[in-house]
Image: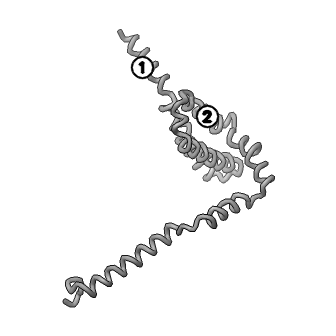
């Protein structure tokens, strides 16, 4: 009877490996290693972990964008887990590899200002106000409403 319980536990553990190991591999260890890189001020470690976080952001954006499709792929969570292991583990230095073979050539080909130009192009084509501008407009409107309410209603007048 005792052997069946441990077999069931191992089965649950294997079936949920991605859920259990994913946060450790994708977040906990990189967080620890990033703090160590900051403290040691190693340029190589800094590049490795900064690159990792950029790639992790891209993976997250990819997942958010294509979530309906990825739900149909039963192996996606395991593929993501293995890819993150490759990016994170010091034996592989996958994030540094991606930087050297993909990111750096793209920067050299397009120039270091390419991303800034893309952001500026988006800003100029999208005339929405920034969050700070929106907050300021709301603050001014609230002050105007309160001022008008004081003029109309004597109960808002502190001298009443």
In the image, 49 versus 113, the foreground residue is: 113
Q: 156 above or below 122?
A: below
Q: CA distance from mark 1 to mark 2?
A: 24 Å
Q: Is residue 46 above or below residue 118?
A: above
> In this rendering, would 124 be left or right of 103?
left
Could you tell me which residue is drawn at 39 percent across and 77 percent down? 141
- Position of the N terminus, as image quadrant, is top left
Residue at numbered disc 2: 85
Does residue 105 appear anywhere in the picture?
yes
User: Which quarter of the figure is the C terminus placed in?
Assistant: bottom left
At a point 31% along the width and 84% down the height, the residue shown is: 148
Image quarter of residue 145:
bottom left
- 125 or 97, which is in the foreground? 125
Q: Would you name the residue on which mark 1 appears?
A: 9
Residue at 47%, 70% (x, y): give it: 134
- Residue 32 visible in the shown view: no
Relative to 7, residue 46 above or below: below
- The residue depicted at 53 percent of the width and 27 percent of the height is 74
- Where residue 54 appears, as percent x and y from the top left, is 63, 49
Q: Is residue 125 left or right of residue 138?
A: right
């Amino acid at each position: 009877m005792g052997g069946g319980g441990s077999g069931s536990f191992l089965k649950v553990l294997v079936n949920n490996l991605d859920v259990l190991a994913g946060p450790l591999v994708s977040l906990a260890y990189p967080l620890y290693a990033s703090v160590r890189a900051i403290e040691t001020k190693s340029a190589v470690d800094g590049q490795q972990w900064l690159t990792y976080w950029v790639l992790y952001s891209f993976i997250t954006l990819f997942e958010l964008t294509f979530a309906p499709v990825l739900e149909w792929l039963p192996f996606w969570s395991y593929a993501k887990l293995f890819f993150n292991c490759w990016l994170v583990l010091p034996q592989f230095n996958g994030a540094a590899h991606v930087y050297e073979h993909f990111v750096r050539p793209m920067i050299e080909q397009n120039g270091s200002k390419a991303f800034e130009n893309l952001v500026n192009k988006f800003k100029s084509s999208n005339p929405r106000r920034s969050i700070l501008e929106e907050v300021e407009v709301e603050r001014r409107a609230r002050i105007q409403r309160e001022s008008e309410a004081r003029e109309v209603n004597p109960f808002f007048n502190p001298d009443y």
